[in-house]
Amino acid sequence: MRYVSIEDGVLSAQAYLAALPELAAELPPGARAFASDPAHYDFYSRRCVKDLTLGPIAHQIGYEAVDVEIRLAPSGLKHDEWLVLRYSDVSSLTLDVAPPNPEGGTRFESLALDEVLPHPDGCSHEIAFWDSSVRVVCRDLTAKWVTEEELARRS
């Protein structure tokens, strides 16, 4: 990530938040709304991305575009809703998967922080877990917090 720092178990979004007013002007509307949400980096908020876990990743391939949906599951720590991210016209989807831990544990278990940046194709969204990451480059993204019941009705 360019601005967000995740080093030695310490998280900091301060440099990103300082740059965000300038970056936001270059982001597509959905990405701008998601990145600029005041709760996004408030570690005490139920709408902060920190501590979510990776759920299903789905894609829809159309004639002109590929769309991707990533669901981030609530943690037992503070969240009571899923975060559903929909990426339109995806040009790149990258998973950086850590090798298995010999002591056990699940990869992609706890989201550390994320970063949304302007990109020539629209925007890039990097989601950093403590051990692995997901990066999507797309035209735009939308983010919606939904309850387990809402999610079940959609499926």
Image (cartoon, helix red, strand yellow):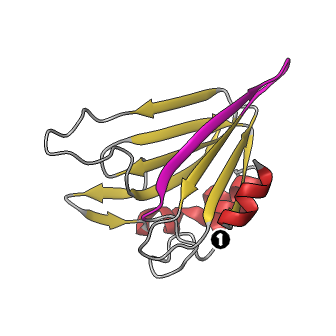
Which region shows up in magenta? Answer: 51-67
Decide whether the magenta segment is chiefly helix, strand or loop.
strand
Residue in front for this viewpoint, 54 or 67: 54
Dot 1: element: loop
Question: Type of residue at label 1?
Answer: Asp
**What is the quadrant of residue 76 in the picture?**
bottom left
Taking depth in this image into account, of 26 and 128 the one nearest to the observer is: 128
Question: Can residue 25 be seen?
Answer: no
Q: Position of residue 122 (x, y in %)?
A: 71, 39
The image position of residue 60, as x and y in percent, is 75, 29
Residue 144 appears in the picture as rendered: yes
128 relative to 126 in the view: left or right: left
* Residue 128 is a magenta residue: no
> Where does the image place residue 83, in percent across and percent down from the top left?
62, 60
The residue where tag 1 is placed is: 37
Residue at far right of view: 63
Q: Nearer the viewer, residue 64 or 56?
A: 56
- Badge 1: few (under 14), some or many (20 or more) residues near its Cα, within 10 Å? few
